Image: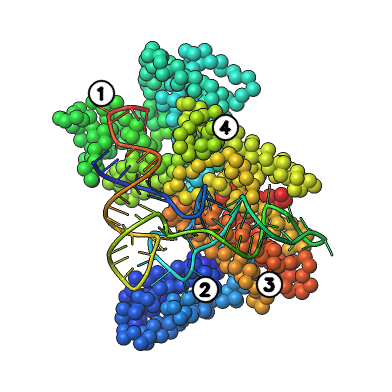
Amino acid sequence: MVTFLRLYNDLSKAIADSLKALGVTADFSLFQPSDDGHGDLSTNVYFLLSKFGNGDGALADNLIKEIKQRAGPIVSVERHSSGYINFRLNPSALDEFLRTVIREAGFPMEPISRQRVTIEHTAVNPNKALHVGHARNLVLGDVMYRSLKRGGWDVEVLNYIDDTGVQIADIILGFKELGFSLDPAGKKFDHYCGDDVYVGVNRALESDEVLREKRSHILRELEDGGPISSFAAQLVKRILDEELKTSWALGAHYDLLNWESHFLLGGYWRDMFELLLAKGLIVKETSGKYQGCWVLTGDNGENKVLVRSDGTAVYTAKDLAYAGWKLGLLNDHMGYDVYARQPDGTNLLTTTLGGSSANTGFRAADETIIVIGQEQRPIQEMIARTIERIDKRKRYRILAYGAVALSNDTAARMGFKVEGSIAHMSGRSGLYINVDDLLSLLEKTALEEVENRNPNAIDKPEIARGVALGAIRYSILRQDLDKLMVLDMESALRLDGDTGPYIQYTLARAKKILRKVGEPAEDVYIERVLSAEERNLLILLFKYDYILKDVVDNLTPNKLAIYARKLAVSFNTFYERRRILGEPDAQTRNSRLAIVKAYELIMGDIFGVLGLPVLEEM
RNA sequence: GGGCCCGUAGCGCAGUAUGGAUAGCGCGGCAGCCUCCUAAGCUGUAGGUCAUGGGUUCAAAUCCCACCGGGCCCGCCA
């Protein structure tokens, strides 16, 4: 079955071969025209050809002939008076596509790759509740995971838990030194640790020298596995378990938890150090400001201290060790165990330090993706370059995204006085919006809406939950990765316009029609009744694999969200203009019904990748 | 001082990877559409020197240079 991705590749080749046959070379491009009226694909090759020949058009005429010969029967080829060569998919091809979708009950997707890849996302410090900035990381990472999986990859999702960092030491101080209770009445434990303990400790630390001393002591104990470690481990687990509930509520799936303490105590940094030394990538400085330090030297004259003159490793060194472990550059002697059962029915594994079951928990891949805030990009790029210098076959890819800030108005409502139009969130000062809070607010708003709009709905709370999740995931996904995202509570709670619920609503509409009218007959022949709105919808559906490839090749999950929105708009246009229930002609009715079915199948598929809940009614 | 990212309609955003045909969408404004598969919807309308200046090109929101405004990174910290 030819789909858009195949068509694109075939046409590219057809044009290239045609040029070759004519003995000319040109760096042409094949693209989707801005206006559908011009065709489904266009090429600029003619403009480039005007540099050759005598300008009498003979060369272009020959080129068209050559391309027509090679393009095959499924597209028509026209030369437009402006000079573009336009390709239009023939109705019979769309017809066949539609029949295939109905017959196979889904998009005829061919695997883009079957390779193994790992992806790390979320990685929230286990000392507080997830806020909306963490949600951006989680949702982007989760959609990348789902996209890769849909594209045929063998994907494993890692969640890194920094259980030895200063933030953990902070809240330990709260419980051990400042008398915070370990049993907050009526408050989720992660919220309590973030809102009360962490904020309280940081306020105390500002003016308390002795407390700061005690924190350094705790930190050292944590890194060396001292007496405080078992208390810390219990505390971290309690908070992490609450965080995971939030992650799962956002639709996340993980395969394995990785712990910073396991990498420290397991000696992975030593192994990485040996590897770097063997490859000649680090040197011990004997003079200058880095005297006595082991320094990583980059290609462009950059220097990064990895080991301090007192022999301890810096944070980046641990990151480098983790990267090496992920990619199989280091020997894996972790143990593995089941940590929890996830809502999607899969087991979440965890590494263990000692006496393990068989080492079947993790298989390294040649490619790994890390999802990080763009402020960390320079350091991660350095890690990527270092990995590449160790082993060219390994690929360390970075998905970086802009920060999430609060609008001035939203910050002000939370009692924070801010200058300028935005306010950056701050865990230490307590200025942030928790994911749980945002979700329950959205759910409340959505429930009111359902009760207003559809009082007879069967399970209104279920619909409200689905709408809330759809709204939050889509609002994160639709935005360009590089852009600062400003969260304004008032607009975040909207459920119409360019939102997740808008898209969810179109699928609910499609499902309603299928419930009322029934399933389409299989022998669909739409060719003769194909109207513009039907064609536009079908051709958009046809492009699914092309879009998915863009997403996995370029790490651009937002492209899929924008595509879903386009599809939804196209469906709504079709829905408004073409009746099915009242259509008297049986063949026409069946054709339209088949399009609705194709929409249900493919949009349902896309919802699975975006992690948007599919709602039968709204 | 060195580097990265953003700037498109009153507001929020697509489009920039791979230059191409009248620069799209949402909210808000104005005017309409429920006896008809759910109006969380649809139609029409007003609203743009694509921050600015130069350059390359048959062609620039898109590429290059400069510059203005905003955000961020550059520690023997984590």
| Colour mode of the rendering | rainbow
Name the residue that disc number 2 marks.
A39
Seen from the viewer's position, the closer of residues A116 and A108 is: A108
Badge 1 vs badge 4, beta-carbon distance below 8 Å = no
Which of the two discs, 2 and 3, labels the residue nearer the N terminus?
A: 2
Foreground residue among A469 and A569: A569
Q: Chain of mark 1?
A: A
* Neighbour tally class for label 4: few under 14, some 14-19, many 20 plus, Cα within 10 Å: few
Q: Earlier in the sequence, mark 1 or mark 3?
A: 1
Q: Residue at x 49, y 19 (%)?
A: A200
Q: Chain of mark 2?
A: A
Q: Chain of mark 4?
A: A
Q: Position of residue A356 (x, y in %)?
A: 47, 31
| Residue A238 seen anywhere in this rendered image of the structure | no
Task: Work out whether disc 1 and disc 4 sit on a shared chain.
Answer: yes
- Residue B52 location, x and y as percent? 36, 56
Determine whether A219 is above or below A39 in the image. Answer: above
Looking at the rendered structure, the kind of residue marked 2 is Gly
Instruction: Give the residue pinned by disc 1.
Output: A310
Circle 3 residue = A524
Residue A397 visible to the viewer: yes
C-alpha span from label 2 to label 3: 24 Å
Q: Where does residue A335 sit, x and y in percent of width and height?
A: 45, 32
Front disc: 2 or 4: 4
Q: Amino acid at mark 4?
A: Arg
Helix, strand or loop under label 3: loop
Residue located at (50% from left, 46% from top): A140
* First along the sequence among labels 4 and 3: 4
For the N terminus of chain A, the quadrant is bottom right
